[in-house]
Amino acid sequence: MNIHIKYDSSDFSLNIKETAEICFKCGVCCVVKGHSCHAQYDDQFNPKYTFVYDCLGTDEPSNNPNIWLCVSCHKCEEICPYDVSPVKFIEAIKAQSFEKGNIHPVLFGELEQISSTGYAFPLTRASERRRNNLGLGPLGDLAANDVKNISERTGLLIKLKNIKEGVD
Ligand code: SF4
Ligand code: SF4
């Protein structure tokens, strides 16, 4: 199967087009034990059909749900012998996919949590107790308010609300 990627002139991933196209599909970034892409461990991939190949080779990359398996660890970028950066391509495609209202439910929940509270995890009584035991004071609202402001001003909160309600 050949890799076909369509690029629109307005496509912001255009600037990484060359990077994506010089991928040799050698598989090094996904199969070198101990250094490879963690998403490769998903059962649907194998040394002949790697995760990176799946992301770069799909006809409509922004409709490919597998892109959300990438955790942006940048291992692929470091190990690639040909200076390809699959992660840059995948991140651009994730952004494009999000604009279209597609996002993995787990990440959607995380985004909601961070944008509304400023923290990646809910703060519980246990968190408070641990902070106390470590001699740390209570967490202030400053960071949380900053994140909320940024989320509001960048339109992220509206976007999340629209995705939740299925509005384009
Ligand atoms: S990104 Fe690099 S290491 Fe990975 S398949 Fe393409 S050329 Fe090979
Ligand atoms: S950045 Fe994404 S594609 Fe690259 S190694 Fe990490 S999980 Fe895999």
Image (cartoon, rainbow, N blue to C red):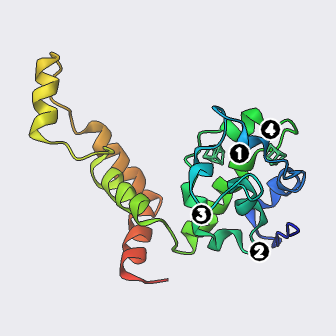
Q: Earlier in the sequence, mark 3 or mark 4?
A: 3
Of 130 and 28, the residue lying toward us: 28
Residue 127: where, in percent of width, then height? Answer: 16, 34
Which mark is drawn over residue 59?
A: 2
Disc number lying in front (1 or 2): 1
Please tell me whether mark 4 sits on a helix, a strand or a loop.
loop
Which mark is drawn over residue 30?
A: 1
Amino acid type at image mark 2? Asp
Q: Is 82 situated left or right of 62 in this image?
A: right
Residue 30: where, in percent of width, then height? Answer: 71, 45
Which residue is labeled 4 in the image? Answer: 80
Of 16 and 65, the residue lying toward us: 65
Q: CA distance from mark 4 to mark 2?
A: 23 Å
At horizontal 17% and vertical 17% (from top left) the residue drawn is: 134
Amino acid type at image mark 1? Cys
Please tell me whether mark 2 sits on a helix, a strand or a loop.
loop
Which residue is labeled 3 in the image? Answer: 66
Q: Earlier in the sequence, mark 1 or mark 4?
A: 1
Q: Assess mark 1: CB under 8 A from ligand 1?
A: yes
